[in-house]
């Protein structure tokens, strides 16, 4: 009997597939939020294992801020094409125009907060009742508290004090009309688990995850890519460095790290040796306050 | 590398969050920026030192009040094992959150303050461990630094606790003297506790055998989703997708689909896109059967001859989780695995005092966090096992159909 044992990655994979199938079984109009980042790419791999040879029971949805890395967008389009799955893209720029929103100002003006408006409009447009996302509990301490099935009100808001108890592997996705559920299949994965899985499954990634030469601005210890979306001031020091990205968000709010990693193996070695967390090293937007993530989630953010 | 899920139970001031902080800190799972954030926050406190508890309290309200309200999940690994910690509140008013955290745990760490010994809260946490059938219990006798690392204090508490363990039929109980604050016997052995012959907490967490906690005897597979591509090439493809919750399935096995009782044989098994000869818990698979029979989400595929009970009357131990009380006659949706059925709570037999284990037979209501023995009748026959014998097919939740909220957790007897 002793060979009936699952490796930890197999256990995490099976749990994630189970969660995806629960979403497919419990909801009428689910969607998978896809950004072209490694976590959502992992979700797509899990969806393939959960539903092939059938089609995905949900479209891929991307909320495009207009500040994305071109490499991630190209990857997104190629992947959807290759899989023959439906891809829905909605642009923050359109929401800004349609709803007369104010563009954020500043050196690294981020449309991160405005994404929520587009997301909620998209949910309404397609009447999505569940959204699968790649958030992990190890990323941040408000996320560490969130359920795998996280019920949101009609404004997408999360109420941490009224979370449903979630027991065993039983997920309660019953909601009122207008509400939606955010489902997080890789809640229990860490950054390293995701990388180990990508290596094991031999999953291709956008090129920006690997070391490359790039013009960057050094700002308060973080390396920000030079792009039309940031404001350059006098005295800004632009240098060319060999960098890679640990996470892929907007060009304005994701920082690069100096790196020698040209393969997944190299990346895993670097992460194992690193002394800084994923969000701490690369997210410019979380540094604002201790409860930044909790507040954004309450307002409908993922 | 395998996986251990454990829960830490403790209340205000007994050092639970400090213990987790210490485990993460000493196993080098806390990174520089998290440490900096911690130092910054600790400075706002008056006593100066770094407050390891701040690592785990993730909500603003928790940090403000200095207590844990909801379960937080924390992760760390050693070369041999990945750990998932459910950091659960221990206060009685958050019992339901502790039950949530405990439901998936293979091991529970029960913290006892060495100065106070076994108290009401210790008993309550142990009762929950026993109700939820957590296979391994670690009694961590904390704050040993405040009792001069006394072996007698440790021994007396262990003798005291052994009585509770016996009453509750807790199986695998280990006692450890520790100081979470000073780091004694958590990751590193301590000179102060040289009289203690056992290992450290981390050694214990790394070595406890969890593989045998998975039941490989009784084959149970709740169908979650039916895969039918309906394309030209795959016209006849019909796969039943689900996660094997217990047991082993092999090609050629005779199976029965419950509750209907239809029978067939396994034609093929797929997992991760590959065809395999056999599959076992907890793998997610797609099963193909020889016969074209009516199977849909919520059905349970079992190996013929090894059936669960299929009944409409259930005796349950029930943890009530809603602020509105449960009264006999109330109707709810009952969900077990992927199956949902209408149900009515026919009768509350008794209410369990979670501090003393006394049974109150005159109770006719259950309030938030109460644990009661109740009788439930379901609208249609339900396939289930007893929670004690096969936990994965013996736990169910109750859902209020008007609010959609999960209001109760049932351990079927």
Image (cartoon, coloured by chain):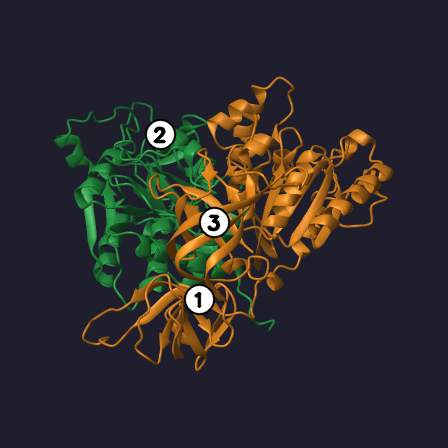
Q: Residue furthest left?
A: A98
Distance between mark 1 and mark 3 Cα atoms: 23 Å
Residue A55's image quarter?
Answer: bottom left
Chain whose colour in the figure is orange:
B
Residue closest to the eye, A79 or B142: B142
Disc with the residue nearer the chain's start (2 vs 3): 3
Q: Which residue is mark 2?
A: A237
Circle nearer the viewer, 2 or 1: 1
> For this view, does B111 lie left or right of residue A282?
right
Q: Which residue is mark 3?
A: A188
Mark 2, chain letter?
Answer: A
Residue B82 visible in rendering: yes
Same subunit: marks 2 and 1: no
Circle nearer the viewer, 2 or 3: 3
Return the x and y of residue B166 as percentages of the image width and height.
74, 50
Q: Which residue is mark 1?
A: B221
Return the x and y of residue A229 as percentages of the image width and height.
24, 33
Residue B191 visible in rendering: no
User: Is residue A200 placed above or below A99 in the rendered structure?
Assistant: below
């Amino acid at each position: 009997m002793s060979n009936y044992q699952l490796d930890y990655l197999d256990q995490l994979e099976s749990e994630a597939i189970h969660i995806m199938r629960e979403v497919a079984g419990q909801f009428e109009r689910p969607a998978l939020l896809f950004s072209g980042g490694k976590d959502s790419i992992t979700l797509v791999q899990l969806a393939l294992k959960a539903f092939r040879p059938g089609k995905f029971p949900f479209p891929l949805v991307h909320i495009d801020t207009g500040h994305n890395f071109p490499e991630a967008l190209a990857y997104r389009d190629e992947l959807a094409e290759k899989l023959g799955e439906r891809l829905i893209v909605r642009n923050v720029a359109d929401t800004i125009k349609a709803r007369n929103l104010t563009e954020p100002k500043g050196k690294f003006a981020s449309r991160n907060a405005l994404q929520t408006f587009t997301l909620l409009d998209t949910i309404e447009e397609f009447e999505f009742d569940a959204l699968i996302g790649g958030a992990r509990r190890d990323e941040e301490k408000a996320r560490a508290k969130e359920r795998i099935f996280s019920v949101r009100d009609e404004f997408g808001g999360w109420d941490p004090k009224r979370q449903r108890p979630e027991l065993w592997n039983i997920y309660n996705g019953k909601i009122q009309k207008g509400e939606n559920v955010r489902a997080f299949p890789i809640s229990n994965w860490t950054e390293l688990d995701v990388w180990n899985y990508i290596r094991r499954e031999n999953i291709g990634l956008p090129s920006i995850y690997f070391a490359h030469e790039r013009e960057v601005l050094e700002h308060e210890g973080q390396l920000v890519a030079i792009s039309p979306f940031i404001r350059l001031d006098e005295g800004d020091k632009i240098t060319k460095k060999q960098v890679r990205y640990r996470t892929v968000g907007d060009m304005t709010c994701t920082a690069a790290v100096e790196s020698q990693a040209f393969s997944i193996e190299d990346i895993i070695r670097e992460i194992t040796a690193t002394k800084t967390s994923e969000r701490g090293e690369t997210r410019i937007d979380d540094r604002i306050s201790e409860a930044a993530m909790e507040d954004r989630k309450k307002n409908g953010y993922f | 590398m395998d996986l251990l899920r454990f829960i830490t139970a403790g209340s205000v001031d007994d050092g639970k969050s400090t213990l987790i902080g210490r485990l993460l800190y000493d196993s080098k799972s806390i990174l520089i920026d998290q440490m900096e954030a911690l130092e910054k926050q600790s400075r706002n406190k008056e006593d100066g030192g770094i407050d390891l508890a701040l690592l785990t309290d993730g909500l603003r309200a928790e940090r403000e009040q200095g207590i844990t309200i909801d379960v937080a999940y924390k992760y760390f690994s050693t070369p041999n094992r990945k750990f998932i910690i459910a950091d659960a509140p221990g206060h009685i008013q958050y019992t339901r959150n502790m039950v949530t955290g405990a439901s998936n745990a293979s091991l529970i760490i029960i913290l006892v303050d060495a100065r106070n010994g076994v108290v009401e809260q210790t008993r309550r946490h142990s009762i929950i461990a026993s109700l939820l059938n957590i296979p391994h219990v670690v009694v961590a006798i904390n704050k040993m630094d405040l009792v001069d690392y006394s072996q007698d204090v440790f021994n007396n508490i262990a003798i005291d606790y052994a009585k509770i363990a016996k009453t509750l039929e807790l199986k695998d109980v280990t006692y450890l003297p520790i100081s979470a604050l000073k780091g004694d016997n958590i990751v590193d052995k301590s000179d102060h506790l040289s009289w203690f012959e056992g290992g450290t907490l981390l050694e214990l967490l790394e070595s406890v055998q969890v593989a045998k906690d998975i039941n490989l005897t009784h084959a149970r597979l709740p169908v979650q989703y039916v895969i039918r591509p309906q394309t030209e090439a795959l016209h006849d493809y019909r796969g039943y997708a689900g996660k094997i919750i217990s047991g082993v399935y092999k090609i050629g096995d005779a199976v029965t689909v419950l509750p209907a009782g239809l029978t067939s044989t396994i034609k093929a098994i797929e997992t991760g896109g590959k065809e395999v000869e056999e599959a076992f818990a907890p793998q997610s698979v797609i099963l193909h059967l020889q016969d074209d029979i009516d199977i849909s989400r919520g059905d349970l595929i079992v190996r013929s001859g090894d059936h669960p009970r299929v009944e409409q009357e259930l005796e349950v131990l029930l943890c009530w989780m809603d602020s509105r009380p449960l009264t006999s006659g109330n109707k709810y949706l009952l969900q077990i695995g992927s199956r949902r059925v209408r149900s009515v709570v026919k009768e509350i037999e008794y209410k369990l005092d979670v501090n003393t284990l006394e049974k109150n037979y005159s109770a006719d209501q259950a309030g938030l966090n109460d644990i009661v023995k109740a009788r439930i009748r379901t609208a249609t026959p339900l396939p289930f096992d007893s929670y004690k014998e096969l936990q994965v097919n013996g736990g169910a939740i109750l859902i209020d159909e008007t609010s959609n909220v999960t209001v109760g957790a049932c351990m079927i007897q």
